Amino acid sequence: MSVAVDGTAGSRFGKPELVFDGPYQADTTGHPSYDVSPDGERFLMVRLDGTAPTELNVILNVESELAQEVVPTNPSPAPGPRSRQGSTLGR
């Protein structure tokens, strides 16, 4: 539900309006089961579709796994001696 609040004329509240409709995942541990974007414009929620998940994949050491999998597509050349051609330093 959403309610407009007018703070300039005391505590006046608008009519409640439905924001989301449908079955969404609820959390039974007391933690929020949603998140709000930093700009406050979007919500992230898990909508239930009536089926329970049958598999959960957990990846341990994901950083080392990714480092082994990632191959640069355009590797940079090895650094060599710096050229001073065209430099005005020391002249």
Image: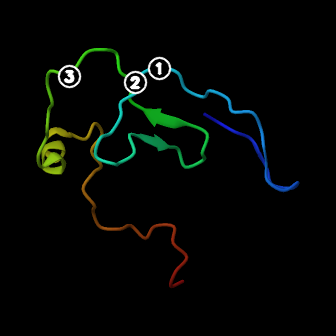
Q: Which mark is residue 47?
A: 2
User: Is the C-beta separation of discs 3 and 2 under 8 Å?
Assistant: no
Residue at 56%, 37% (x, y): give it: 42
SS category of the residue bearing label 3: loop
Crowding at dot 3, Cα within 10 Å, few <14 / some 14-19 / many 20+, comes out as few
Label 1 vs label 3, nearer the camera: 1
Q: Residue at x 27, y 51 (%)?
A: 77
Mark 1 vs 3: CB contact within 8 A:
no
Up/down of 47 relative to 75, above or below: above
The residue carrying mark 1 is 22
Find residue 37 and report its horizontal and vertical position in percent. 53, 44
- Which sits earlier in the primary sequence, circle 1 or circle 3? 1
Residue type at mark 1?
Gly
For disc 2, the neighbor class at 10 Å (few under 14, some 14 to 19, many from 20) is few
Please provide percent x and percent y for residue 60. Answer: 11, 46
Furthest residue toward right: 9
The residue identified by callout 3 is: 53
Judged left or right of residue 25, residue 90 is: right
**Towards the viewer: 41 or 10:** 10
Gap in angstroms between the C-alphas marked 1 and 2:
7 Å
Q: In terms of secondary structure, where does tag 2 sit?
A: loop
Picture coordinates of residue 45, whole percent (x, y): 43, 33
Tell whether label 2 touches label 1 (CB within 8 Å). yes
Closer to us: 83 or 23? 23
